[in-house]
Image: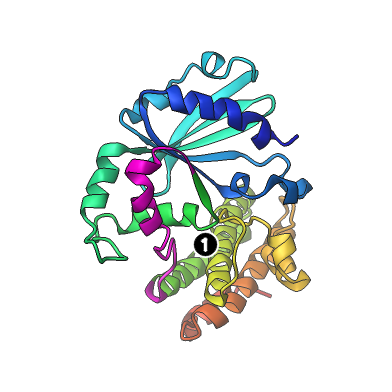
Amino acid sequence: MSSTTELLPATLAWLKRNEFVESAVLFGSAVRDQSKCDRRNYWSDLDLHVVATEPSALESVDWNSALPKKEFCLQVARPATGGVRKVTAVFASGQIDLVVVSSIALSKAAESLLPHDSLCSITFDVPLNEMATCLHSGYRFLKGKKKWGAFYARIAKFPGVRISDFELHRMGNIFVCDLLWVLQKLDRGEIVAAQHVIHGKLVDANLRLWRELQLRRGTLLPSFGLGRRIESLCLPHEVALLRVNSRADREELQHAAEQCFVALKSTMTEVAPNWFVPTPMLKLLAQWIN
């Protein structure tokens, strides 16, 4: 039995009796037919988009009482993309992730939409496209469909989180500046600092660009998380480009940084063919790149 199957009935019962939960929508891998899920989905999280009248109340749930037979382990609350909060509750049998949205904020967003609009005002553009991204892989109401069903159906038609051509160029330029910083720090022997930026910025940028490339190709991504399922979605040479395999060693990190640069140029050739690294910058990088 998968963790989602085991946790869902108890979670559904808790949602229905919780006075602060106005609406709850199941999304992600748990929406798919569990009989068709492979081993990789066996421990998938239970992902819920929750509209709450008192969002803060969901950050202090007594999970031992809410789901008494599920052996509660730990709860954390943290900011999530789109200006909302995410509450994660971990149990011995699985994990529940609640994306918590204020009913007041979502009502204002709904009011900003004209009846014929498929887009929203500039104020809510990013948050609602973040929401749309969650819904694109499928969703199912567990509570509150009568009030919020039509609104969710409209949001599901939004394009979701995408990277504009302008932002692609900006990301490429930032990457090159970060790459120069990494090479300079490696030259000075600052191994840990360089390692941190390679993984935290260069790899992150390449994964975001790769995701945008797949969306522009029309590829249906099973998950929107960075790096998710790349091993099964990419060709072997693409996986080799996107994957960083290096120890905290100057030569290995130098190779990793150069590999990230190759991956960037490869992706940008397709997603932003007009982008280029200015010749003076290439000459500057050449001082450190073999």
Relative height, residue 112 to residue 234 (above, below): above
Q: Position of residue 205 (x, y in %)?
A: 53, 62
Question: Tag 1, which secondary structure?
Answer: helix
Count of marks, rendered view:
1
* Residue 221 lies in the magenta stretch: no
Question: Is residue 182 among what the camera can see?
Answer: yes
Q: Position of residue 18 (x, y in %)?
A: 41, 23
Relative height, residue 49 to residue 238 (above, below): above
Residue at the spot 56% in from the left edge and 52% down from the top edge: 200
Residue at the spot 38% in from the left edge and 48% down from the top edge: 149
Dot 1 surroundings within 10 Å: few (below 14), some, or many (20 or more)? some
Return the residue at label 1: 181
User: Which quadrant of the view contains residue 104?
Assistant: top left
Looking at the picture, tell me which residue is in the foreground, 223 or 1. Answer: 1
Amino acid at dot 1 = Trp
Relative height, residue 167 to residue 201 (above, below): below
Residue at the spot 73% in from the left edge and 42% down from the top edge: 42
Question: Is residue 288 among what the camera can see?
Answer: no
In the rendered structure, the answer to whether residue 143 lies left or right of residue 106 reads right
Range of residues picked out in magenta: 141-166
Looking at the picture, tell me which residue is in the foreground, 40 or 187. Answer: 40
Q: Position of residue 84 (x, y in %)?
A: 37, 42
In the rendered view of the protein, which quadrant contains the N terminus?
A: top right
Residue at the spot 60% in from the left edge and 70% down from the top edge: 219
In the rendered view of the protein, which quadrant contains the C terminus?
A: bottom right
The color scheme shown is rainbow
Q: Position of residue 88 (x, y in %)?
A: 53, 32
In the rendered structure, the answer to whether residue 110 lies left or right of residue 100 reads left
